[in-house]
Amino acid sequence: MPDRPVQPPLILVVDDEDANRLALERILVREGYDVRHAEDGRQAMQRLREEPPHLLLTDLKMPGMDGLELMRAARAVDPDLEVVLLTAFGTVETAVEAMKEGAFDFLTKPLKRAEIVRTARKALEKRALVTENRALRDELARALPGEVIGRAPTMRVLLEEARQVAGAQASVLLTGESGTGKGLLARWLHKVSPRRDRPMVTVNCGALPENLLESELFGYEAGAFTGAKGRKEGRFDLAQGGTLFLDEVTEMSPAVQVKLLRVLQDGEYERVGGTRTLRTDARILAATNRDPELAVREGRLREDLYYRLNVIRLEVPPLRARRDDIPLLARHFVARHAERNRRAISGLSDEALDALCAWDWPGNVRELENALERAVVLCRGEVVELSDLPPAMRQARTRPAVLSFAPGTPLKDVERAMIEATLEQCGGDKALAASLLGITARTIYRREAEWREEEGTGAPREEG
Ligand SMILES: Nc1ncnc2c1ncn2[C@@H]1O[C@H](COP(=O)(O)OP(=O)(O)OP(=O)(O)O)[C@@H](O)[C@H]1O
Ligand SMILES: [Mg+2]
């Protein structure tokens, strides 16, 4: 690292067994790291807030909050925190699940010194990279104030609505599939509102266990629970005069929902363990990628709270419902990631663009951005080529035809169109097409012969 005096990275070790914890601590200290430890999840969260670590090394199986829950909670506080899990034989499956959720790695007990040191070093390197990238990203975001790209008709309507409600006090519920841009739109709403010079505070309600969410939102008074040394301000306090963004809002426990309802109705709340009534004027934005009406019907979301949140509803359409925006978004992401990676890439080939336009984007704009970030890194030329895209997308170039027939269309014609379209989709594989259509491959051969006959072309006959 450059000339700045470098502070040793801070590692938090969490294990309920003293011997393990001490052994780990000794190994890591000898490597020059700063180490803190905790015996359980609750204590770990406490430490984590007092002194944010760069790496969390936690046992998976612990009484109370287990390692996976701790990871989720910790990453809600610090999304860049790298996590390494320590697992015993038999818990590897959970560790794999944790990896899918973003853990850096897991180590299986009995732990080996060299392995611990190597994994910690790699995790910290990644953390440093991510932080750097984030700083760069923030710089970019400031340069282009959270540009929401959308020229497709559905997006124009949405953005116009958003502009109209940006200055209001009423709460807004943002809905839409994962990755459609709800978070971005929420930030944009804040930025164009009169509250733009006040903070925007975000809470991910799905990532925190009930009691933590409550104290994050409302804060706590000294002595509210064991370990609550001083008073802590809640996010409602921090968002005074600004915007509070409640992400994954359908994931709140009933108790927290009641408290939130009260804030929405009267602007009043109390800290955990406190008796003084506090007031907030924060504007509430909420988002969910679930169906909020369904959550109400299933009893997971209070109906009265739903109505309070849903005063203004902004529904962000899935990317497949605004394909016209794909080229625009694609160029935007290529430019952004090329700049970030210091690559001289000017755009995309037509073939690559066609493939992107044909793909269905279950992960929406986030999936598109990720695909193009990867493509920019892999790209060897000056434009992103088809071969730089993820393999599945390369094959998506032919968009499945949607057939429609007017009532009264002869079934024979419907059958022919359907067989032909399916064959095309299957790359001419008759066996596959037949199994999709629920008929035999023989039937397909027979029909094809009939069609040829009708067209008078006849089956290609052998000469002689
Ligand atoms: N219209 C857009 N223009 C430019 N960038 C966009 C647009 N929509 C989304 N993005 C980018 O795509 C990524 C995903 O968007 P975002 O995180 O806002 O999705 P989300 O709807 O909040 O998803 P989730 O439900 O999973 O939280 C972000 O990097 C965001 O900046
Ligand atoms: Mg989001």
Image (cartoon, rainbow, N blue to C red):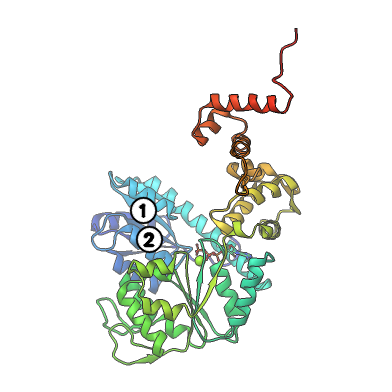
Relative height, residue 166 to residue 426 (above, below): below
Answer whether residue 25 is visible to the viewer in this image: no
Any mark on residue 85, and which? 1
Nearer to the camera, 213 or 37: 213
Three-letter residue code for mark 1: Leu
Q: Position of residue 261 (x, y in %)?
A: 37, 82
Nearer to the camera, 231 or 52: 231
What residue did someone put label 2 on? 71
Q: Residue at x 43, y 81 (%)?
A: 308
Relative height, residue 236 to residue 423 (above, below): below
The quadrant where residue 280 appears: bottom left
Nearer to the camera, 88 or 323: 323
Q: How many marks?
A: 2
Left or right, 254 with reference to 201? left
Considering the numbered disc 1 on the image, is that residue within a helix, a strand or a loop?
A: strand
Relative height, residue 365 to residue 278 (above, below): above
Q: Residue at x 60, y 69 (%)?
A: 138
Label 1 crowd bin: few (<14), some (14–19), many (20+), radius 10 Å = many
Q: Position of residue 427 (x, y in %)?
A: 62, 33
Q: Are marks 1 and 2 in contact (CB under 8 Å)?
A: yes
Q: Which quadrant would the N terminus be assigned to in this image?
A: bottom right
Q: Which quadrant would the C terminus be assigned to in this image?
A: top right
Q: Position of residue 244 (x, y in %)?
A: 48, 79
Label 2 crowd bin: few (<14), some (14–19), many (20+), radius 10 Å = many
Answer whether residue 29 is visible to the viewer in this image: yes
Relative height, residue 351 to residue 61 (above, below): above
Ligand 1 quadrant?
bottom right
Q: Earlier in the sequence, mark 1 or mark 2?
A: 2
The quadrant where residue 62 appears: bottom left
Mark pair 1, 2: CA separation: 9 Å
Considering the numbered disc 2 on the image, is that residue within a helix, a strand or a loop?
A: helix
